[in-house]
């Protein structure tokens, strides 16, 4: 059975933007295959073959996010903007929480608290979709605009991002471009990340929230970092599947996402089991050199940011990455979307 396309990454340029400014989610129909595999050229076959291995729930979830929740009506908040009030340091996060300035000042090196407390993450990185902490309200469109227009709030958002990056053993090198690198203490932090897979859900939330709140250019550098660490350096095996299923497809800029999928395809082994993009289009794809203005799924201008220095050039050969399975997700942080990690491709 063929499935409707839930990944608009490889739509033709003429199909990207409809007259209403929304991306046109028509099927990804191939017109030729350099391998001569006729089956892959038929409409719909790519989708059905992908979903044999790829996390179907992840495809739906990330497509819905990238297209700004077309099925979601903004709730009437009656003037209550709790996410904005929290970021203005006016209210504590709930339940049993603190003001945001207390978190940013006092939790920086308190890794045990950041790991064990499951209430703060929805407040630090709000989304328009509900989460498991019912005290945290979904982000409203009015709040999104208020976040983007307040320098005070944007500064705290960047500091919150730096707080969580440090928890994961990552350092924000450049606040302008979003370039990231390993922190000095990356080894014990990577060990923690490999050992607590509920952090995969948190990172997906962080990436989504960055895209909602005006830091979309931070998405691609972080995703590129995780692709490098999982597919090239092989340091984060328990994060690998979430990187491919979720992190990669949180990037709203279509052109940046294509670059990242291409990088993943170049370094994934065995390449014949790569299911996150159409192989014929990946073979024809030519990566851009240097930053340039791009557009997101809905035609909004976005700048292709620097993603940091490459440690392995595209096209270079790497040792095959062994199939790994993640550690079970912490039930206390599991959201309504199940299956954070799809089953790894089978030989």
Image (spheres, rainbow, N blue to C red):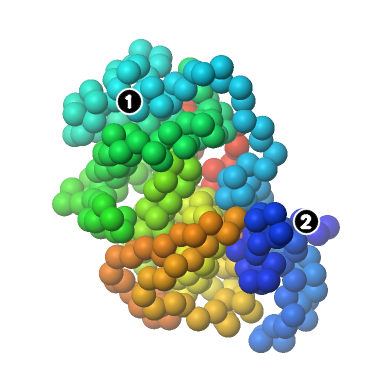
Decide which of 66, 262 is in the foreground and name it: 66
Q: Horizontal and vertical percent for residue 82?
A: 44, 21
Crowd band around label 2 with a 10 angstrom C-alpha radius: few (<14), some (14–19), many (20+):
some
In which quadrant will I find the N terminus? bottom right
Q: Is residue 275 visible?
A: no
Residue toward you, 131 or 253: 253
Q: CA distance from mark 1 to mark 2?
A: 44 Å
Residue under the point 50% across and 71% down: 262
Residue at the (36%, 75%) spot, across then down: 290
x%, y% of residue 77? Answer: 56, 20
**Considering the numbered disc 2 on the image, is that residue within a helix, a strand or a loop?**
loop
Q: Is residue 29 visible?
A: yes
> What residue is shown with label 2?
3
x 29%, y 34%: residue = 152
Q: Does 120 appear above or below 339?
A: above
The 10 Å Cα crowd at callout 1, few under 14, some 14 to 19, many 20 or more, is: some
The answer to whether residue 176 is left or right of residue 133 is: left
Which residue is disc 1 drawn over? 88
* Mark 1 touches mark 2? (CB < 8 Å): no
Q: Residue furthest left?
A: 184
Q: Earlier in the sequence, mark 1 or mark 2?
A: 2
Count how many numbered circles sit on residues in the image. 2
């Amino acid at each position: 059975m063929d499935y409707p396309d839930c990944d608009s990454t490889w739509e033709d340029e003429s199909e990207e933007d409809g007259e209403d400014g929304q991306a046109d989610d028509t099927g990804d129909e191939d017109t030729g295959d350099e391998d001569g595999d006729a089956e892959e050229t038929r409409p719909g076959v790519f989708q059905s073959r992908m979903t044999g291995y790829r996390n179907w729930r992840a495809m739906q979830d990330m497509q819905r996010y990238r297209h700004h929740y077309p099925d979601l009506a903004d709730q009437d908040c009656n003037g209550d903007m709790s996410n904005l009030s929290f970021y203005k340091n006016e209210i504590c996060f709930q339940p049993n929480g603190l003001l945001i300035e207390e978190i940013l000042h006092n939790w920086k090196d308190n890794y045990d608290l950041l790991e064990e407390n499951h209430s703060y993450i929805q407040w630090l990185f709000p989304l328009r979709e509900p989460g498991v902490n019912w005290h945290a309200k979904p982000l409203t469109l009015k709040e999104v605009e208020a976040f983007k227009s307040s320098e005070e709030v944007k500064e705290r958002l960047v500091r919150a991002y730096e707080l969580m990056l440090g928890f994961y053993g990552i350092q924000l090198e450049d606040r302008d471009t979003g370039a990231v690198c390993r922190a000095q203490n990356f080894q014990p932090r990577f060990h923690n990340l490999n050992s607590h897979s509920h952090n995969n859900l948190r990172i997906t939330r962080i990436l989504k929230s960055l895209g909602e709140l005006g830091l979309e250019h931070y998405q691609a550098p972080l995703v590129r970092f995780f692709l490098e660490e999982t597919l090239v350096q092989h340091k984060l095996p328990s994060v690998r599947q979430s990187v491919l299923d979720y992190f990669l497809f949180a990037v709203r800029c279509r052109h940046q996402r294509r670059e990242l999928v291409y990088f993943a395809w170049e370094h994934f082994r065995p390449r014949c089991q790569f299911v996150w993009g159409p192989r014929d289009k990946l073979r024809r794809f030519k990566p851009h050199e240097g930053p340039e203005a791009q557009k997101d799924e809905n035609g909004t201008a976005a700048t292709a940011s620097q993603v940091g220095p490459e440690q392995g050039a595209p096209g270079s050969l790497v040792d095959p990455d062994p199939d790994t399975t993640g550690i079970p997700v912490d039930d206390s942080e599991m959201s309504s979307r199940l299956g954070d990690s799809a089953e790894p491709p089978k030989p």
